[in-house]
Amino acid sequence: MKENIIIVQNLTKKFVECLAVDDISFNVGQGEIFAFLGPNGAGKSTTIKMLTTLLHPTSGKISINGFNPVLEQDQARASFGIVFQDPSLDDELTALENMEFHAMIYNVPSELAKKRIQELLELTELWDKRNILVKTFSGGMKRRLEIARGLLHHPKIFFLDEPTLGLDPQTRNQMWQYIKKLNETEDITVFFTTHYMEEAEKMADRIAIIDHGKIVAMGTLGDLKQKTNTDSLENAFLSLTGSQIRDELTDGRGMHGHMRGH
Amino acid sequence: MKAAFVLWLRQLKRYLRSKSRIIGSVGQPILFLVALGYGFGPIYAKAGGGNYINFLAPGVIGQAILFTAIFSGIELIWDRQFGFLKETLVAPVSRLEIMLGRTLGGATIAIIQGLIVFVLALFIGFKPASWAGLLPALLMMFLIALFFTGLGTAIAATLQDMQGFQLIMNFLVMPLFFLSGALFPLDGLPPGIAKVTQINPFTYGIDGLRAALTGQSHFAFSLDLMVMSGFTLVILVIGTYLFSKIEI
């Protein structure tokens, strides 16, 4: 039995008018690939923000690599890397400068940083473009750079919030192959959200489905299909969350507790 | 302090790359110096004020610093909108250090802008009283830069997007500039305007700068220094507090 690297107990986040995350509990084992699925506005990003110290929980307990993200922020922060749903690069800097910035702010020793930056940029096929300003990059290149950057400080946990949104199938495939390889060789725990059910089907060891702030199902792909008596994750997902289309408020903390950009 | 350094460096790199910004924010003070300096110069001399360009130059140097500094602080909103702020907020460094790096970066840029305007003013006819005054002038420039970068950051920390920007420019930055004594002497003002200039921090920054560069001032340099230091300290504390409260 592997140790749990993410422990979440009775986690709740209330915004002024609504309950975004409602008393959820789950664990993720070291080295596991864990998919966190749900319709728009279900509470996925709010949960990731609490796990990554960007939001304070209203109540409940979180442990990230043994650290409390509220009280031991810096240790928790050093334990994970993250690729956000929307871009977080500095467009006015080059790819290399974005990487160097990250290395310095995460205190990676400079010799080591140099080596890793080259490795990661070669892996994501950006090494030739390292001295080009990021603002000229395509969406796929930016994503690859963000992935490379998120791994630069060798995090124990890698959070990916809809990392493949807007990518073509080639880039998506390549990206997942790389993440899978890292997971196998470096034992990195991967926690990701996506709207592409086949990604979760193919990649995830375990899947949790969240809706209206509550986890409605959790287990392996087989568990979920069995529980809902369906033959695919997509059908399992629809049977658990219904087929009604969710409105998502984008201007601030809306009805489903969602904030800008979610 | 590595993180503060790299944030400072980032601000500087971005600044050096944006030529239009450098030229743009030098243009306005120089226009003021040329148009008002030459335009009002004769009347000012007739009224017994002496050389108006010499009076005005510290004012427009301060203007360049004021606008650049406020703008650098407000850039925080862009970083939030374009997402880069998140990258710094999940990094294992304290909010204080991030705030420090950003503010020093913004202040450094503002001082460079001020120095560019200073050099250009020399060509337009500005004659500093003594070169020894450059050192206290630099100190005053640093305080003005730090204060307004801090103010910009404090405001930006409470805003979600750029929609309030016009409001800030018209109801805060412009009045701070125009009601400061940057353009006119503070002696003999109507009591209402005099009161306003007295509670305006920029008044003391300009007055100190003018004292250092030309030897003429309304208040004592030591008073200017004390008031600006006090204001700067307070705004940095408020700014750091507001910055630490940012949730994304």
Image (cartoon, coloured by chain):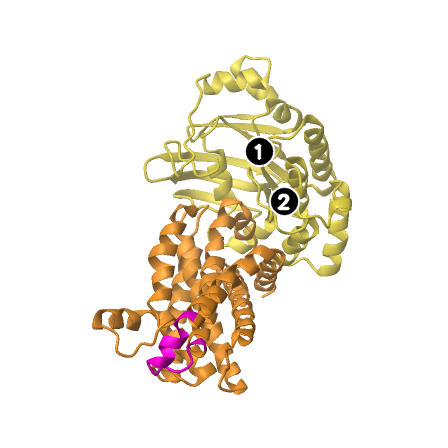
The reply to whether residue A57 is in sight is yes
Specify the label residue B30 is tagged with.
none
* x, y percent for residue B20: 57, 55
Helix, strand or loop at label 2? It is: helix
Which amino acid type corresponds to the residue marked 1 in the rendered image?
Answer: Glu
Which amino acid type corresponds to the residue marked 2 in the rendered image?
Answer: Lys
Q: Mark 1 points at which residue?
A: A162
* x, y percent for residue A49: 49, 42
**Residue A68 in the figure: left or right of residue A14:** right
Specify the label residue A135 is tagged with.
2
Helix, strand or loop at label 1? It is: loop
Task: Tell me the magenta residue range.
Answer: B39-53
Say which colour chain A has. yellow
Q: The orange chain is which one?
A: B
Which residue occupies 45% across, 44% down?
Answer: A61
Count all numbered tags in the image, as a single digit: 2
- Given the image, what chain letter belongs to the residue carrying mark 1? A
For residue A192, above or below residue B241: above
**Residue A47 in the figure: left or right of residue A256:** right
